[in-house]
Image: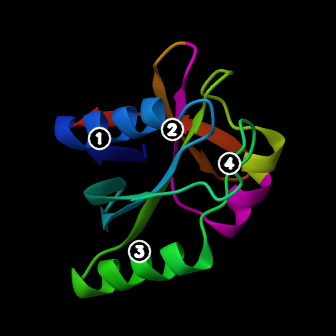
Amino acid sequence: MECIVLTQKEKDKLVAHAIGQQPSESCAMLLGKKVDNSWNVKEVFLTQNIDNSQTNFTISPEELLKGYQLAEKMHLELVGVFHSHPNSDAIPSSTDKKFMQNNPVPWIIFSGITNDLSAYLLDSDVIEIPIKID
């Protein structure tokens, strides 16, 4: 089964970013390597939500470019997309599902209600995958 692997430090960084950006959604690019069924995060690239919205997020083209340039410099690839749902559960919204088609990597969502992280991958349908703390 597919899984996404984070260190405790990376998880803490994502949670702190999500809480710090409330009431807006937060977002980040997760860079690393996919080995077999494991999406291994090696670098968390925090980004700003230019929508400044509680229900949507957009990463600016400039920040996306910086993230991809960092990945290339470090010999990594995009292995995940992170964002938060400040006022709802960590379940992909219909908008998330639409954008998951364009970014077929695990999506980690943080719930501002439960303070939980969940990860999802779009296969023929959206499936929840484990988050392993390495």
Callout 2 amino acid: Gln
Position of 19 compared to 45: left or right?
right
Mark 4 vs 1, N-terminal side:
1
Mark 3 vs 1, N-terminal side:
1
- Read off the residue under disc 1: 13
- Point out residue 25 in the picture as x, y percentages from the top left corner: 61, 40
Label number found at residue 21? 2
State which quadrant residue 88 falls in.
Answer: top right
Closer to the observer: label 1 or label 2? 2
The magenta region covers 98-113
Give the spatial CA distance, label 3 vs label 1.
Answer: 16 Å
- Read off the residue under disc 4: 52
Colour mapping = rainbow
Mark 1 vs 2, N-terminal side:
1
Give the spatial CA distance, label 1 vs label 2.
Answer: 12 Å
Q: Residue at x 40, y 40 (%)?
A: 17
Callout 4 amino acid: Asn
- Read off the residue under disc 3: 67
Mark 2 vs 4, N-terminal side:
2
